[in-house]
Amino acid sequence: MKFAVIVFPGSNCDVDMYHAAKDELGEEAEYVWHDATSLEGFDAVLLPGGFSFGDYLRTGAIARFSPIMNEVVKAAQAGKPILGVCNGFQVLLEAGLLPGAMRRNESLKFICRPVNLAVKNNETMFTSLYNQDEVIQVPIAHGEGNYYCDAATLASLKENNQIVFTYEGTNPNGSIEDIAGIINKDGNVLGMMPHPERAVDSLLGGADGLKLFKSIVKQWRETYAVKA
């Protein structure tokens, strides 16, 4: 399986994403610069965290217009797995690939620490190796991770089982309904604020995030590789 790791000016978690895919999974991975115009040959797309374009205007607002995002949209429409973490999640929201928006943390402070997450939907291509309601520990590192959506969108998220992760115990940023990660209706675009790529090895403090990446590979081998 071949992963594209998208790199925007200001990305700082791209190396972590590459490490998770290449070194921990043993799969192919390549960095793809934001001004590239093709994702041909890639089976999945990873949008890393960081401060794309300095987070000017709004987080992800400028990155959303990078040429590569046209190809990310096409990949999403083709059913390929798209994972956006932290700033990557914010970019997916700005691009309209996921509903809702991000606001400043309620504390108005940058937060960087491990948090507990509950797996609220383990029937996705990203979470199939977790148990339903399993509690995992994954780090966060953000200043604008307060997920918000209107009542109609929230009702739709619940109705379609699109809430994949919620904060367990303490909500660190004020996100509505403790939401930490959501998926699109088609089930192939996941956005989450916590960093699973920083929790793929016990040497990093824990490996609870590794199952997410393994779930992607498992789904691809069982579905896309068979079709190919």
Image (cartoon, rainbow, N blue to C red):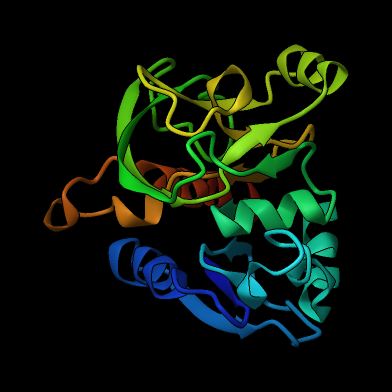
Q: Nearest the camera: 11 or 30?
A: 11
Residue 90 seen from this side: yes
Q: Quadrant of residue 160?
A: top right
- Occupied quadrant, residue 192: top right
Left-right relation of 41 to 202: right
| Residue located at (52% from left, 65% from top) | 1
Q: How many marks?
A: 0
In the image, residue 120 lies at what x, y percent? 51, 19
Which quadrant does the C terminus fall into? bottom right
> What residue occupies the far front of the structure in this picture?
108
Q: Is residue 83 in view from this perspective?
A: no
| Image location of residue 154, percent across then percent down | 76, 19
| Left or right of 67 on screen, residue 50 | left
**Residue 101 appears at what percent x and percent y?**
74, 41
Name which residue lies at 79% across and 70% down: 69
Please tell me which residue is depicted at 53% across the width and 22% down the height of the picture: 178
Q: Position of residue 58 (x, y in %)?
A: 73, 59
Identified at 53% across, 74% down, the residue is: 11
Horizontally, is 188 left or right of 208 in the view?
right
